[in-house]
Amino acid sequence: MSSLDPNPVYVTISRIPAGRVCSYGEVARLSGYPGKGRWVGQLLSRLPADSTLPWHRVVNAAGRVTCPKSLLAQERLAQEGVTFHNGKIDMNCVAWP
C-alpha cells in the first residue's frame, strides 16, 4: 500500500451526493492526488464491510461499476435513482462535481 494519506480521498467520497457518481480518477484529482485513480480503487477495495462511506458512488471513467461488490453497488445506485443502460451510467447526466 502507498504511503499517501487516504483521508482526503475518504472526505471527497463522503461529499458525493446521493444519485450522483464520480470516477476514480476524478476522486483522486479532487483529493489532491492526480493520476492516482487506481490507488483510489485499491483503497475502496480494502474498506470494511460495515463502512458507511458511499463507495458505491465511485465508478470508472466510462460509467461502469468495476468494484468487487458491483452488484451491491448497482443496487444501491439504482435505489438512489441512477439508471444504467447496457451496464453503463450516462456520466454526462449524473457525474459529480
Image: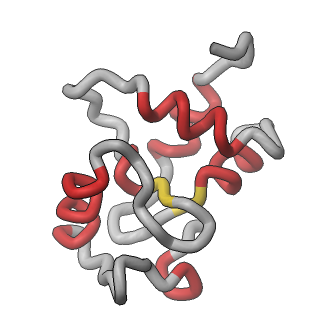
Answer above or below: position of 8 versus 55. Answer: above
Answer above or below: position of 33 versus 79. Answer: above
Nearer-the-camera pick, 20 or 75 = 75
State how many labels appear.
0
Nearer-the-camera pick, 41 or 82 = 41
Image spot of residue 51 (x, y percent): 28, 29
Image spot of residue 10 (x, y percent): 52, 33
Quadrant (top left, top right, bottom left, bottom right) of the C terminus: bottom right
Nearer-the-camera pick, 28 or 74 = 74
Image spot of residue 90 (x, y percent): 49, 85
Report the residue at 79% width, 38% height from top.
32
Location of residue 40 (image quadrant): top right
**In the displayed structure image, the side of residue 66 where residue 10 appears, left or right:** right
Quadrant (top left, top right, bottom left, bottom right) of the N terminus: top right
Answer above or below: position of 29 versus 31. Answer: below
Q: How is the image coloured?
A: secondary structure
**In the displayed structure image, the side of residue 6 where residue 51 appears, left or right:** left
Report the residue at 43% width, 79% height from top.
89
Answer above or below: position of 71 versus 47. Answer: below
Report the residue at 54% width, 79% height from top.
91
Image spot of residue 93 (x, y percent): 50, 86
Nearer-the-camera pick, 60 or 79 = 60
**In the displayed structure image, the side of residue 35 where residue 76 appears, left or right:** left
